[in-house]
Image (tube, coloured by chain):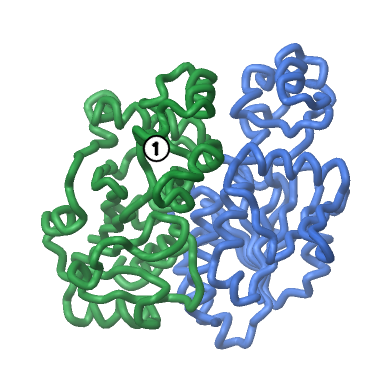
Chain colours: A green, B blue
Amino acid sequence: MLTIILAESELEIMPGELVNHPLIVSFAHQRRKQPYRILLDSNYHHVAMKDLVDGRRRGRPDITHLFLLTALESIANKKGQLKIIIHTRHDDVIYVNPETRIMRNYDRFVGLIEQLFEKKIIRSQEQTLLELKQKVPLNKVIEELKADKIIAFSEEGKATNLNKYLNDLKKHKEKNIVCIVGGFPSGKFNCDMESIAADIISIYPEMLVAWAVASEILVNYEITYL
Amino acid sequence: MLTIILAESELEIMPGELVNHPLIVSFAHQRRKQPYRILLDSNYHHVAMKDLVDGRRRGRPDITHLFLLTALESIANKKGQLKIIIHTRHDDVIYVNPETRIMRNYDRFVGLIEQLFEKKIIRSQEQTLLELKQKVPLNKVIEELKADKIIAFSEEGKATNLNKYLNDLKKHKEKNIVCIVGGFPSGKFNCDMESIAADIISIYPEMLVAWAVASEILVNYEITYL
């Protein structure tokens, strides 16, 4: 089994500092929602975000959206060999049912995640599709997975050929693999990743977007294990 | 070199039959554009499209968008080993400069493609980013590429392990590979693919979305050739 965790992803409800900002109030009004019920989105709110702590990094639901569209549509997922978890900067954790069909339309995706933050669960008939648990730090999320190997992906990690690396894991009968991919647009993990992951690896000398890293993990995993 | 052609993609300017449809007129008005200058988009126009020929298949700029976000951000592209071509149902062909940074925001992407259909070229400083050539059938596009091997991907093709398949090509010193992926939501290629591609292969027994097929091609190509 492969688990991919999109860690420290920039997915959050409008922070308190901005709910009274005129641009946010007007944007929320247009969407007929309360300002404290909409997602922070730098694509629309960047002007209001300029004084926000970490403002140039935050508000990126698009990264989570593209990551989910990549992971859920992968062969590994269709074969039932993938767990997908979204962890956010505020330690909100979203458990994603592999059968979830995420809408390709971004605005509808944003609406879905807003509903999730409000209700904590999205169900379809008998199934839970998305479940939100709050205040679960990344190390707790990982502990529950009882992984054979925990690997973080970072531009600053050790240069590694992923294909050879996974083949070595397979030889050592390590099957339950957890891969941690950053869900932020640039920069480093905020947490102490060295205390969490067994290896921090770099698969390309420059920055890659989260969904490109996810593709590399998924296809290499399929080739090695499936 | 790897070329991926997104073939028969459902990307087109509003067809003549719909430019006077009240829903389209009103949608175009909201966007402050002329109806004959907007992209057909089933996400917004599905009600107006119900009597359109092939209406359930057409108007899917989202597929091209997600395909481009996958291909352009791949390691193969960053290493300068990828050509990306979009071919549409009306034989419009878009040549994509590998250095193009496609906007993640879907509405802005749609605006860009509308501009491309109007001006036929999108430039940034000294570079051509996107170029549109009209009335170029798929076989002509492929002829110009002087490929060693032309492979089409289809659910109905021959079940194939892509990793082994590419390794065999490499052994036979076939390096200039053209992969054809369908840019439509479901169904078959309209053209006679058997007369175009040397092999029609299936990498999974069920339908895969275009960007998942692209991921498989890109990562397998990187492992085999780069």
Residue A150: quadrant of the picture: bottom left
- Residue at x 54%, y 19% (from the top left corner): A30
- Residue at x 69%, y 39% (from the top left corner): B110
Residue B45 position within the rendered picture, expressed as x and y whole percent measured from the top left:
65, 23
Q: Dot 1, how many residues are within 10 Å of its Cα: few (below 14), some (14-19), or many (20+)? A: few
Q: Is residue A58 visible?
A: yes
Of A16 and A37, nearer the camera is: A16
Residue B10 position within the rendered picture, expressed as x and y whole percent measured from the top left:
68, 40
Residue A141 position within the rendered picture, expressed as x and y whole percent measured from the top left:
17, 53
Of A221 and A210, nearer the camera is: A210
Question: The C terminus of chain A lies in which quarter of the figure?
Answer: bottom left
Q: Is B210 drawn above or below residue B218 in the view shown?
A: above
Report the number of discs.
1
Question: The N terminus of chain A lies in which quarter of the figure?
Answer: bottom left
- Residue at x 45%, y 53% (from the top left corner): A57
Q: In which chain is the residue bearing label 1?
A: A
Left or right position of B192 against A205: right
Residue B147: quadrant of the picture: bottom right
Residue A24 position within the rendered picture, expressed as x and y whole percent measured from the top left:
49, 28
Of A208 and B10, nearer the camera is: A208
Q: Which residue is outermost to the top?
A: B22
Query: The residue tagged with tag 1: helix, strand or loop?
Result: loop
Left or right position of A3 against A218: left
Q: Is B10 drawn above or below residue B79 in the view shown?
A: above
Q: Amino acid at mark 1?
A: Arg
Residue pointed to by mark 1 = A101
Q: Is A174 drawn above or below residue A64 in the view shown?
A: below
- Residue at x 64%, y 37% (from the top left corner): B107
Q: Is residue B206 visible?
A: no
